[in-house]
Amino acid sequence: MTGHRTFTELIQAQAAESPEREALIILTERSGILEPRTITYGELDRAARRLAARLRRHIAPGDRVLLTHSSRELFATGLLACLYAGAVAVPVAPPGGRPHHDERIAGIVKDASASCALTASTEAADVSQLLARTGYGHVTCVLTDAPPTAPGAPADGTAGTETGGTGAGPAAGVRPGAGAPEPVPAPSDPDAVAFLQYTSGSTRDPRGVVVTHRSLLANQEAIGRALGTRRGARIGGWLPLHHDMGLVGQLLHALWLGGTAVLLSPTAFVKRPAHWLETISRYGLSASGAPDFAYDLCVRRVNDAQIAGLDLSGWDIAVSGGEPVDPATLRAFAERFAPAGLRPEALIPCYGLAEATLLVSGAATAPADLTGTGRTTHCGPPASADIRIVDPETHEELPDGRTGEIWVRADGVGPGYWARPAETAAVFDGRIGEDSEPYLRTGDLGALADGLLHVNGRLKDTIVVAGRNLYPQDLERTAQRVSALFGPATAFAVPGARERIVILQELRAGSRYDTDLAGLVTAVQQQLREEYEVTTGGVLLVRPGTVRRTTSGKVERAAMRRLFLRGEVTALHQRVDPEVQRLVASGRRR
């Protein structure tokens, strides 16, 4: 795991030393059953080499290549092929048919100046159409699952899409023996860009974080030391691979360890949360993780009969991260799955962000505090990082216990944002005093206490009412406690003579809409008034799925605020102050 200057060198060494070792176990749902498919290090390496050779026909070293796959196997193959070809991988979600999702992909293509897209034969038409209708029809689509080209046959087609494989299955590029892969020199520059990790955009437009081989390997070391992961371990889960927690924490960390990444799809998890825990049990995963909402979903939707079939005693590292960690959720999860052998000390809250590659704080020696009654649990000690809590206005360091902006310095912090020098300077060059080394300004609020980091939320999400700072996740949790019918919520402020708080509260799927919705709104207003001494400017009860989340589970409060102010949120029932109604009406007319 050490001694390699780039991740490319490391993965090629793993394949040479242990070609028959399992690299991936891909679980595909068919008729409610997860069917496994195993890919060895040798097979993965050969597939990546073949694809890298085809990719070089379309790109030059350093070109940005979009990775857009539903298949976890093809995503892994495409990522390694980019590394082998000297390209810069740009992971994105596959087209989903939703306008805001397609807009995000188009924005990333523009920001990264991508010249090529790797996709599957089953998704190529959707990707090509998306690129064409957003003005990027010149971007060539290369099929990751195209079979080896027959001797004398043309390798490439016209109309922007490579031919050869429209009927090929996901296994086509992976099976050994179909043509000798070309030798690939491993890039040896640790400061070369490995991939661009686009931020979730929960509070602003997505920006491409530059992840170099140096920062990637440094963060892998930090994860290994903090969590105590072992060489050869089985690690995995359902997290999207275009997001940093799934990509760096589950796929790449398993490969870094010379272990096995066991991967199911996000769709399989959402459809049946027990799939995640059954995967951990059946395949002996020692480490897996997810955002807070996933643990809550398991508590509510995994039944007693399913729990009876689980063995979670080998789950040593159950990471909770990606959004504020609610101690009540982890307490409920620990109690619910104790009969399956889950140890409470396995629950490890962590904090990280794409700008630091992934992990910033968290440790297996600092499990979640399941006994406290505080708003959030800690997120562990710094993980090979220098963490400071700083006044965001004066840039003065604050003492323990005080809340301020979290600033980070670590080898895993990348050099900045792609092609955005002004924003890079603003975010990656925070200074405490005139002579200090640069720190990454995370934009997150938190405090250090007894060496443990407590994360309170996003600086830009903070709501100021009558001179008081209120955190939206507090308001959201208070609203959600009003009724068992309530699912996700979002809270934000809207302007006016004074800032008004608006709550959008989802009803859970299957809820009866003929219940006393007006009474529920009154109860939410009363609860917020009693707990925070605030009067809401609006409470809207909405259908399931209305509240947008990022791929990591973070509520997109800024996006929901924009939709509300434009009058684009449809409520089942609402109570909105006249001043706020006038604000929304003016937004509709613009």
Image (spheres, rainbow, N blue to C red):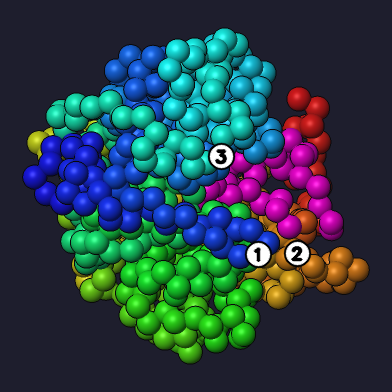
Q: x, y (%) of residue 173?
A: 44, 36
Identify the main secondary structure in magenta.
loop
Q: Quadrant of residue 9?
A: top left
Q: Amino acid at mark 2?
A: Ala
Question: Along the horizontal axis of the image, is 254 left or right of 303?
Answer: left
Tag count: 3
Q: Determine the secondary structure under disc 1.
A: loop
Q: Earlier in the sequence, mark 3 or mark 1?
A: 1
The nearer-to-camera label among 2 and 1 is 1
Query: Any mark on residue 32, and which?
Result: 1
Magenta range is 544-573
Q: Amino acid at mark 1?
A: Gly
The nearer-to-camera label among 3 and 1 is 3
Real-space CA distance between mark 2 and mark 1, rounded to the nearest whole angstrom:
20 Å
Q: x, y (%) of residue 479?
A: 65, 67
Task: Answer whether labels 3 and 1 touch (C-beta < 8 Å).
Answer: no
Q: Nearer the viewer, residue 149 or 10?
A: 149
Q: Residue at x 55, y 67 (%)?
A: 275
Instruction: Report whether residue 12 is seen.
Output: yes
- Tell me the residue that label 3 is attached to: 169
